[in-house]
Amino acid sequence: MNAAGGTRRSPADALASTLRDGINARGVTLAWLHDQLRLRGNAVSMATLSYWRSGTRRPEGAQSIAALSDIEELLELAAGALTGSLGDTKRTGPVGRSQFPIDERDLEEMVKDAFAALGTPYPDTTREVTTHSVTDVDAQGNVSYCLTRSIVQSTTGTVAAIPFLELSPGVRTPAPVLSAVSGGRISARYSHPSGEVHGALFELESPLTAPETAVIEWSIGFPAGYPPTQETGHAVARQCRELMVWTRFHPDALPDWIEEKIETPTGIRLAPMSLAGRTSIHQVRRAFGPGAIELRWGFGDREDQPG
């Protein structure tokens, strides 16, 4: 009972009321909402949406919570209008199995070595719910700095630290400078003898017990002697609700050609891209992974560039 003597509404009832009001105010149907969610990569069934609207069931798990965030945007509700009414939940929902994001067996073995050296189990038991990765390119046309912000979630048990790795398949490099910007600190570092895998252990400010989430931010800098790099990207081992890679070029070094590379455990897809008069380009995928989103660029004729 609340202080005024009335009956406190359950989280499901509160969410249902807000959802019904939002649908009515927007003047849309449940079918429209279902179609819009599907286009965003959130395949929530009509039956499930109906249950949420009636209060018969409440959303559970990471995918359902991701769908609620999209519904808030689609119905033009304030952020948290729906997700904020859920309270605590003890389920993560289906998150998919972890899988090495690219078809590189030797590289995966190196990654396993890195995980072992950092004292963390392989595969990682967290998932990236949403990740935005920003890369700055210098006046010479090479990568100079990367900043990544993620909402991470524990999928099972309690997680106190998350390993992050920088991979350069087939290229030996010195260790890049991985730094914690917010949400924790770097507690350990590792470089594989091959020079193709470097990593750091990001110790969270507070441990996460499934299905809790946290927002973290980290950066990658490149020391003197690091080979010139004209590609960037981000890889995820589990499906990510939204993955964005934003590459910002120096205005004095706009590339002559740009190519998108989408790599998954089952194959590679290449596609040309264009700045179209801008100095930056972004790649966005929803419900993406396991896999990697990459961007490559160069100067001169594309045919003269190595594959």
Image (tube, grey):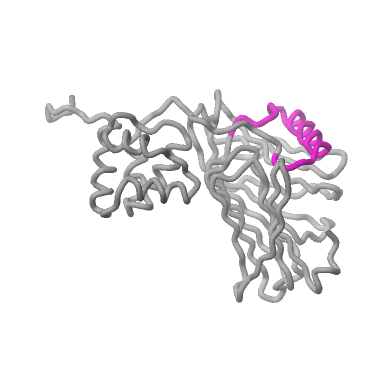
In the image, residue 83 lies at what x, y percent?
Answer: 37, 40
Residue at 83 percent of width and 37 percent of height: 106
Residue at 57 percent of width and 55 percent of height: 284
Q: Is residue 124 magenta?
A: yes
Q: Picture quarter containing residue 227?
A: bottom right
In the image, residue 177 lies at what x, y percent?
Answer: 73, 49
In this rendering, the answer to whether 43 lies above or below 261 is above
Which residue is farthest left? Answer: 5
Q: Quadrant of the N terminus?
A: top left
Foreground pick, 115 / 290:
290
Q: Is residue 65 magenta?
A: no
Task: Classify residue 207 as left or right of residue 5.
Answer: right
In the image, residue 34 lies at what x, y percent?
Answer: 39, 45
Q: Picture quarter containing residue 80?
A: top left
Residue at 53 percent of width and 41 percent of height: 129
Number of marks: 0
Q: Quadrant of the C terminus?
A: bottom right
Residue at 75 percent of width and 64 percent of height: 142
In this rendering, the answer to whether 39 lies above or below 62 is below
In this rendering, the answer to whether 41 lies above or below 230 is above
Foreground pick, 286 / 82:
286
In the image, residue 302 lies at what x, y percent?
Answer: 80, 69
Foreground pick, 223 / 126:
126
Task: Classify residue 131 as left or right of residue 100.
Answer: left
Q: Which residues are magenta?
A: 101-126
Task: Classify residue 113 as left or right of residue 66.
Answer: right
